[in-house]
Image (cartoon, rainbow, N blue to C red):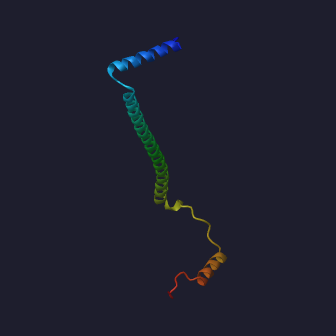
Amino acid sequence: MNINVDEILQMVQDLRSQLEVWGVNSQGLWFVGGAAALLFILSLREVLTWYFRVNQVRDEVRELRSQMIVMTKMLQETRDMLINPNDVPVGPPMRPEELVKIAEGMRETPKFRLDH
């Protein structure tokens, strides 16, 4: 497609003369251009608002999915503990010396004070 500058200028001149025939002056064109710019800005604002809301919903869905995975795992562990209570891992028993130290510590620092 070969269009030179002279043809483009001629098309613009033809458009301007047609607008004059219709009775559209430069003030009318400025008004239409301003209205078009305002509508464009408002539509851009709506698109951006929609985009950020969709991203927020997407992030919330991802968070809910991860919470569901954790909750499912906890439910399975609870079910397994209820079905087989003997399979619950228990740590090694404490030595008597450790128990004595803990008891002395509890005796030295009372948890409930009655003087308040």
Identify which residue, 96 or 67, lies in the foreground. 67
* Residue at 49 percent of width and 59 percent of height: 81
* Between 23 and 36, the one nearer to me in the picture: 23
Residue at the left extreme of this rendering: 22
Give the image location of residue 65, x and y in percent: 47, 47
Residue lying farthest to the bottom in this orientation:
115
> Is 11 drawn above or below residue 81 in the view shown?
above
Q: Is residue 85 above or below residue 3?
A: below
Residue 82 % position (x, y): 46, 59
Residue, far right: 97
Residue 112 placement (x, y as % from top left): 52, 82
Q: Residue visible at 37% across and 25% down? A: 25
Residue lying furthest top:
2
Q: Position of residue 99 (x, y in %)?
A: 62, 77
User: Image height check: is 74 above or below 32?
Assistant: below
Q: How many marks overall?
A: 0
Quarter where residue 38 is shown: top left
Does 78 sit left or right of 104 as displayed?
left
Seen in the picture, residue 62 relative to 30 is either above or below; the reply is below
